[in-house]
Image (cartoon, rainbow, N blue to C red):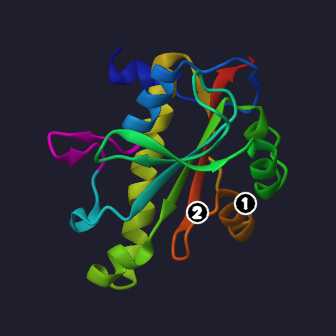
Amino acid sequence: MMLKELLMRRRSVRRFIKRVMPRELFDYLLWVSYGEVNGRLVVPSGGATYPIHIYAVLGDVEGLEAGVYRYLNREGKITLHLKGDLMRDLSRACLNQRYVAEASFNIVIAVHYPRITSVYGERGVRYAILEAGHIGQNIYLACAEEGLGTVAIGAFNDELVSRVLGLPKGIDPLYIFPVGYPAE
């Protein structure tokens, strides 16, 4: 599909049908978010500092138990971070946005600001946010390509999201993308 077609199909989806996401599609969405190609990541990063951490909160993904996974982008694999169905807890932390719980899974973009601010000072915060924006657009376009839906979420309680995901100190949630099959 041409980029122009993907851009025309790109939209925010807030209603999902209950359907298991094939593992292959799940892996693809993680790769387009922050994957590696020939030693470089699929998005630009200020000074190649790559301060972003990608987590996935799973509800219905083929062959994987519910829980929080960390995407190890340089290795192209995931590791289980927390066990259990935390979709509703994440939804509550996102100010009760129900579609967070209804999606097959959620991609959470988190950031380690010191990794970039140690190079660029406070300006590094802006660069990290720009990097997250590049990731978000990749997620939107991949969803459009695969007939999936997503919506960018920035409205959430940072402390609650960090607690639900069990984020290490110094890693802050920045952006959340529920991913699933559109109901409309």
Viewer-proximal residue among 90 and 94: 90
Viewer-proximal residue among 128 and 160: 160
- Above or below, comparing residue 20 to residue 122 in the picture: above
Q: Is residue 40 magenta?
A: yes
State which region is magenta.
33-43
- Above or below, comparing residue 42 to residue 124 in the picture: above
Q: Residue 17: x and y, percent?
A: 76, 19
Mark 2 or mark 1, which is nearer to you?
2
The residue at 51%/22% (across/down) is 23
Give the left or right position of residue 173, taking residue 93 as reference. Answer: left
Q: Is residue 64 magenta?
A: no
Q: Which residue is mark 2?
A: 173
Q: Secondary structure at mark 1?
A: loop
The answer to which of marks 2 and 1 sits earlier in the sequence is 1
- Above or below, comparing residue 162 to residue 176 in the picture: below
Instruction: Name the residue type under label 1.
Output: Phe
Instruction: Name the residue type under label 2.
Output: Pro
Viewer-proximal residue among 44 and 56: 56
Mark number, residue 156: 1
Q: Residue 89: x and y, percent?
A: 80, 51
